[in-house]
């Protein structure tokens, strides 16, 4: 809502522009509304107790809220009959008292927004759940008939599970939500008709494996799904007679899997998604994991066999060599594979590396890329592979990488596999050999182009790593290592 930015800026050029801007509803259909937080809290000081300072801050707070309320009312009144897209945020810091009494002006802002409820189309809400439920308390029985997209982030969850009325909107199609107490057992807290109409669901807070199983069984029109799955508290109850989960429209599925192995296996076996083309899977071990149990293949693997159109595959987390081999064997249609996650970067985009490397200690890679060598097994691994991405590699040698690329180029020349077009790898070691020219020559001879994007740890010529050095842990500027640099 800044006067230096569009659309307000357009009203300050001249009277003609101002008249045109005010009579053009479509430029007023979007707005972001940041709500100032509790005036008794200072980000640099904490809770303010001085009465004089607090009184002054409260006056400023009230004036700001009233001004913001007036602007929102005027802004939305210019939008005519257009569908509205807005976001509203209340940033609560760790020490903030989210239970403080909301001033009249904040309730007035909520009421202004709710007076346009029949035109809400795309809505983003980010605030503590206690503040949201005060907003929801202002809601009159209304169907929110135009609401199609909802992004909801409820911070600082309370132990109470409350109904979120916006989820019952009859036209809701896309849902992004982070609200732990709601998503964990979401199928028990949301009116049932909603699920059959949703096409996009992104839950960035945990959902139990049992509830996900029930949820997917009802989402027959789901196109995109992304979920964080945890184990149910009633894992001792077996699942019997699970019917097929029919997802004929599903194209993309992403899962952070920490669920019970048996439940997740049943779910993946039940899913029938013939149109699935993109699968992202991250497996972690839940607190219910039994170390003494016989190692089992990750639950996701049956889905690779059931959905034969998967072209994009991402894998990360706790995956054994056998898991990877099975994924490569069953991913016959995969054209783009991503192994691991990109490394952390600073705000300028530079990758964080430890200042020193112990050259004698090389940890094994989580993903053994040599499994992609042609000729290493009787089965051709990923015969349609065109793009390879892998991160946080350490033990794979540059010479081995050159062998991998060479065998795939030669197999392409024999007509056995698709041409490898892109290789993007991130190493946690320094470069051993420059393979760029060799790869370029091989690709040219095969009549193709292979784009190499290889990231290595930067050279450290100043001093070697010495674990017994008395200056270990001191940076170049003689400052101690910080958590910003060391992972």
Image (cartoon, rainbow, N blue to C red):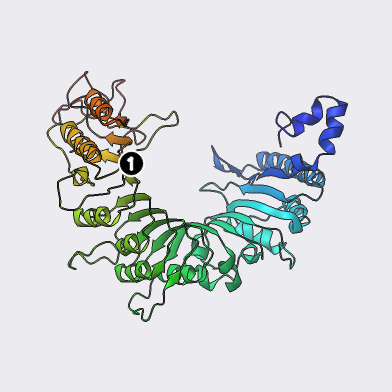
Specify the quadrant of the image occupied by residue 452.
Answer: top left
- Any part of residue 481 in sight: no
- Residue 471 placed where, x, y %? 20, 25
Q: Nearer the viewer, residue 99 or 33?
A: 33
Q: Measured along the vertical axis of the image, is residue 32 above or below residue 346?
A: below
| Quadrant in which the N terminus is drawn | top right
Q: Measured along the vertical axis of the image, is residue 135 above or below residue 458?
A: below
- Residue 294 placed where, x, y %? 17, 67
Specify the quadrant of the image occupied by residue 342.
Answer: top left
Q: Is residue 189 left or right of residue 423?
A: right
Number of dots carrying numbers = 1
State the residue at coordinates (74%, 34%): 7
Residue assigned mark 1: 386
| Quadrant in which the C terminus is drawn | top left
Q: Nearer the viewer, residue 182 or 228?
A: 228
Q: Secondary structure at mark 1?
A: loop
- Residue 443 placed where, x, y %? 27, 30
- Residue 320 placed where, x, y %? 21, 55
Q: Nearer the viewer, residue 142 or 478?
A: 142
Q: Nearer the viewer, residue 307 or 314?
A: 307
State the residue at coordinates (44%, 28%): 348
State the residue at coordinates (85%, 39%): 23
Q: Is residue 58 left or right of residue 327?
A: right
- Any part of residue 170 in sight: yes
């Amino acid at each position: 809502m800044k006067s230096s930015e569009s659309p307000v800026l357009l009203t300050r050029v001249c009277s003609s522009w101002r008249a045109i801007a005010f009579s053009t509803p479509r430029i007023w259909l979007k707005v972001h509304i940041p709500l100032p937080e509790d005036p008794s809290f200072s980000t640099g000081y904490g809770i303010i107790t001085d009465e004089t300072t607090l009184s002054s801050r409260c006056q400023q707070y009230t004036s700001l809220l009233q001004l913001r309320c007036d602007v929102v009312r005027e802004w939305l009144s210019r939008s005519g009959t257009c569908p509205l897209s807005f976001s509203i945020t209340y940033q609560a810091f760790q020490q903030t008292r989210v239970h403080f009494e909301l001033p009249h002006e904040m309730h007035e802002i909520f009421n202004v927004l709710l007076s346009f409820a029949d035109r809400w189309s795309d809505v983003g809400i980010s605030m503590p759940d206690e503040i949201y439920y005060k907003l929801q308390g202002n809601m009159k029985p209304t169907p929110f008939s135009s609401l199609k997209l909802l992004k909801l982030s409820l911070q600082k969850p309370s132990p109470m599970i409350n109904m979120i009325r916006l989820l019952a909107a009859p036209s809701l199609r896309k849902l992004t939500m982070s609200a732990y107490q709601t998503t964990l057992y979401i199928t028990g807290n949301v009116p049932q008709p909603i699920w059959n109409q949703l096409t996009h669901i992104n839950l960035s807070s945990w959902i139990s494996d049992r509830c996900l199983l029930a949820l997917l069984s009802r989402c027959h029109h789901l196109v995109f799904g992304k979920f964080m799955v945890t184990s149910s508290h009633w894992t001792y109850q077996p699942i019997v007679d699970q019917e097929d989960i029919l997802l004929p429209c599903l194209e993309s599925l992403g899962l952070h899997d920490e669920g019970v192995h048996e439940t997740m296996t049943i779910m993946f076996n039940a899913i029938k998604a013939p149109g699935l083309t993109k699968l992202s899977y991250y497996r972690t071990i839940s607190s219910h994991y039994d170390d003494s149990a016989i190692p089992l293949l990750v639950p996701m693997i049956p889905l690779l066999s059931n959905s034969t159109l998967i072209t994009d595959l991402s894998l990360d987390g706790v995956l054994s060599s056998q898991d990877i081999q099975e994924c490569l064997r069953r991913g016959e249609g995969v054209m783009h594979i991503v192994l691991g996650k990109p490394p952390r970067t600073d705000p300028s985009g530079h990758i964080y590396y430890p200042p020193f490397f112990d050259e004698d200690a090389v940890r094994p890679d989580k993903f053994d890329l040599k499994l992609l060598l042609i000729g290493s097994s009787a089965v051709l691994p990923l015969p349609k592979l065109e793009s390879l991405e892998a991160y946080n590699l350490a033990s794979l040698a540059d010479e081995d990488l050159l062998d991998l690329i060479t065998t795939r180029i030669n197999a392409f020349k024999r007509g056995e596999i698709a041409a490898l077009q892109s290789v993007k790898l991130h190493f946690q070691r320094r470069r051993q050999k420059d393979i760029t020219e060799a790869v370029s020559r091989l690709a040219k001879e095969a009549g193709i182009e292979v784009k190499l994007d290889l990231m290595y740890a930067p050279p450290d010529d100043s001093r070697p790593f010495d674990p017994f050095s008395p200056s270990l842990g001191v940076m170049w500027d003689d400052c101690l290592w910080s958590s910003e640099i060391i992972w």
